[in-house]
Image (cartoon, helix red, strand yellow):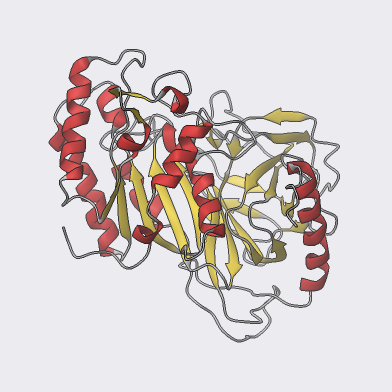
Amino acid sequence: MNRPPLPRGTAYAVLAALAAVVIVISTAIFLGTAGRDGRTVTGSHENRGSAEPAASGQWVGTWATAPAAAEPNTAKGFAGMSIRNVIHTSIGGTGARIQLSNLYGTVPLAVTHASLAVAAAPGSPAAVPGSMQRLTFAGQPTATVPVGGSLISDPVRLAVPAAADLLVTTYSPTPSGPVTYHASARQTSFIARGDQAEEPLGTAYTTKTPYWRYVSGVDVWTQEAHGAVVALGDSITDGVTSSTGLNRRWTDFLAARLRTEPGAPRYGVLNEGISGNRILLSNSPSPTANNLSGLSRFDRDVLGRTGARVVVIALGVNDILRKPQVDNPQQIVDGLRSMVRRAHERGLRVVGSTLMPFHGHKGAVQRQEVTRQGVNQIIRSGGVFDSVVDFDRTLRDPAAPERLLPAYDSGDHLHPSDAGYEAMARALDLEALKGQAAAAL
């Protein structure tokens, strides 16, 4: 007979308990190292100090975020502090590795202790018993992330559940300069004094924070997922008005569809949204531009992501709204076409979005609506993307098409509500995510 669904906390507790059992069982097996391009590896190799592949599989991104800026007032970094980032997986696997970024740092970032664990409950700094793993880098327990660079950890044995929270913790004993961070996390993370990188109970983590710091990606070793969808966008993709800690960005709803719907491609979902992001212009450089333009960050945030197979581009609104404002629709479309060409050169399929309504948003004027409609007309006519998802038609008010439908409006007349984000995910044709890149458009 039909039973009512478990409450969210209870369901997660059951999931966490199962994960703990699997962790114990899986310590005798695992995957190991493979190229970060996600190529399949089969068989075993000479032991190099980390677990080696026990079966065929590939690396695929389960979570990512774009390094967005240098955090204000962090000239000395977080010396002598442990940063425990809480991130949410899209797909699971039998092992994991992380990426750390020092893109906006002005001195090398010394990480003397780093760890990875499965969270015991949603948004909790406590770890599932037995899941806490110390991370190494090129076989060493410490690492230095160069100025402007990034670093990938060695893989660890870990049963990573899909749709679960992971804890990525770093400790740096010395001042690191400006902290590379992502401000609009919509997720609560934690900070503790001293080296608490492997503290499993979370009791030392008394300071809450709304940011992700240093961590920019998590890959899993999987035999089930076939690649990843990368979502390149602005604050709407970032999910700035979604419910904090509940994972209700449109990319989260898409990940749920890909996990559960029959016939859906089994892809990880990587959210590369940055609030305020534009196609054509970055923020003013000093010395490195904060909030790099879509064109400037495309190689790093899309082509550089592990297992990327398809990209969904939802950019252009801020080119119209933010100064210096772009009035010519063709300039915006030309920028989109440039990204499509680069994706095709790497064999990625591109799904592009129409620009959603923003009438009533603070500062919006009629000429900007004319530009938006001009961009959408070109996109809908074809010849820009391999496939189009019409977020405009999905979220607009039929009685006033220049506005968001009230049920989908967060209240600022630009960003969707949770219901609006869910409608965006449902508007995507999952069949459009399959296959190879089309011929040059």
Q: Is residue 303 visible?
A: yes
Q: Residue at x 51, y 57 (%)?
A: 258
Residue furthest toward the front? 1
Query: Residue 192: x percent and y percent?
Result: 77, 35
Front position in the image: 343 or 44: 343
Asked whether, in this view, residue 327 is left or right of residue 12, the answer is left
Q: Residue at x 56, y 58 (%)?
A: 260
Query: Residue 154: x percent and y percent?
Result: 63, 65
Asked whether, in this view, residue 191 is left or right of residue 437, the answer is right
Asked whether, in this view, residue 355 is left or right of residue 54, the answer is left
Front position in the image: 173 or 317: 317
Query: Residue 347: x percent and y percent?
Result: 30, 66
Query: Residue 429: x percent and y percent?
Result: 37, 54
Q: Is residue 150 visible?
A: no
Q: Is residue 346 above or below residue 296?
A: below
How many numbered discs?
Answer: 0
Q: Residue at x 44, y 46 (%)?
A: 426
Front position in the image: 66 or 180: 66
Quadrant of the image for the C terminus?
bottom left
